[in-house]
């Protein structure tokens, strides 16, 4: 993050009420999850990939250390979308209004290409999960954005390809947003789950109209209030997290 951008962010954070992501552990249909809710009216969500030299942050601790050099710190965080071997985002990626990857509208191999997929769009004071073709049509002015897939919930309906009797089980993480965009809910499973089970959590338990899958077994979550650091050996691509002034 450039010093000027960090200074402007620090000023904006000072104007927000003191708050932290609400993280908790829950069980739903015999599956264990960690759920972190972010209120966009009181918290600042940001996307991060690499520093000014192009070095990928890759780990929550590395990103937190870089933020602290700017008088900021990282609270809750999780991986935020699929990436290539060199950690470049697979899909659309915008960070602080700079587009690093265009929108990918077509189907393809793997979970990302299991259409419909979607985009998480961050704007000041709100966050929205939007299905990709609708995103292209609406062309919202996102401050930052990340594309991933598949969608888990689309306007209140589960992804049409999810099967109740699926045997494909992995650790999974994703995000859902409320209709008014004021609340973003991030979830990681603590045991392997199917897409169908994960989608039901967002739709029926969390009551979110739109939700997006981020990734599978590489997924990690930092939740300081739960004593969860998210430390791991795998180098991540895009990271999303709550940024606040350093204490």
Image: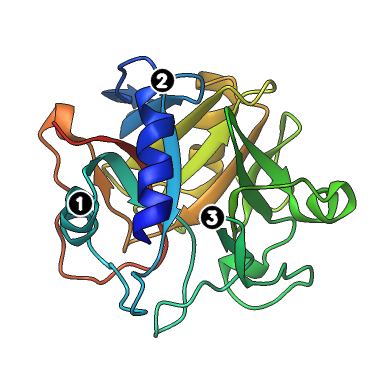
**Viewer-proximal residue among 13 and 177:** 13
Q: Which residue is mark 2?
A: 16
Q: Quadrant of residue 121?
A: top right
Q: Give residue 148's quadrant in the image.
A: bottom right
The residue lying toward the viewer, choosing from 7 and 117, is 7
- In percent of width and height, residue 116 lies at 74, 55
> Quadrant of the image for the N terminus?
bottom left
Query: Percent position (x, y) of residue 65?
Result: 15, 55
Q: Nearer the viewer, mark 1 or mark 2?
A: 2
85 horizontally vs 150: left or right: left
User: What residue is pinned by disc 3?
Assistant: 96
Query: How far apart are the two marked residues, 2 and 3, measured between alpha carbons?
Result: 19 Å
Q: Secondary structure at mark 2?
A: loop
Q: Residue at x 59, y 53 (%)?
A: 145
**82 relative to 20 in the view: left or right:** right
For the question of whether residue 18 can be seen, the reply is yes
Are the residues flagged by discs 1 and 2 in contact, CB closer than 8 Å?
Answer: no
Q: Pointer 1: what residue?
A: 64
Element marked by disc 3: loop
Q: In the displayed structure, would residue 7 be above or below residue 225? A: below
Q: Quadrant of the C terminus?
A: top left
In the rendered image, the vertical position of residue 241 relative to residue 47, given as above or below = above
Residue at the image point whose x is 43% and y is 19% from the top? 42
Which badge, 1 or 3, comes first in the chain's sequence?
1
- Viewer-proximal residue, 234 or 167? 234
The residue furthest bottom is 86
Pick the residue in front: 244 or 222: 244
The vertical placement of 146 against 89, above or below, is: above
CA gap, disc 1 and disc 3: 18 Å
Query: Which residue sits at x=75%, y=72%?
Result: 107
- Earlier-in-chain disc, 2 versus 3: 2
Please give left or right for residue 72 compared with residue 86 in the image: left
């Amino acid at each position: 993050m450039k010093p000027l951008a960090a200074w402007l962010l620090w000023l904006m954070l000072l104007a927000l009420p003191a708050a932290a992501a609400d993280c908790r552990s829950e069980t739903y249909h015999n599956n264990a999850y960690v759920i972190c809710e972010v209120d966009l009216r009181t918290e600042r969500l940001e996307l991060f990939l690499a520093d000014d030299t192009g070095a990928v942050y890759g780990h929550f601790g590395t990103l937190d250390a870089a933020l602290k050099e700017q008088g900021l710190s990282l609270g809750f965080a999780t991986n935020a979308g699929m990436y290539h071997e060199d950690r470049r985002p697979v899909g659309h990626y915008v960070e602080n209004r700079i587009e690093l990857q265009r929108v990918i509208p077509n189907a393809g191999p793997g979970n990302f290409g299991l259409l419909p997929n979607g985009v998480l769009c961050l704007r000041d004071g709100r966050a929205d999960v939007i299905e990709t073709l609708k995103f292209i049509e609406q062309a919202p002015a996102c401050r930052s954005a990340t594309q991933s897939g598949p969608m888990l919930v689309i306007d209140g309906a589960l992804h049409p390809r999810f099967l109740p009797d699926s045997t494909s089980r992995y650790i999974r993480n994703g995000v859902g947003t409320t209709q008014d965009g004021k609340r973003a809910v991030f979830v990681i499973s603590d045991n392997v789950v199917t897409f169908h089970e994960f989608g039901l959590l967002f739709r029926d338990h969390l009551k979110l109209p739109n939700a997006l899958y981020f990734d599978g077994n590489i997924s990690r979550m930092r939740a300081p209030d739960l004593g969860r650091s998210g430390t791991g050996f795998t180098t991540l691509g895009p990271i999303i997290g709550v940024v606040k002034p350093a204490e």
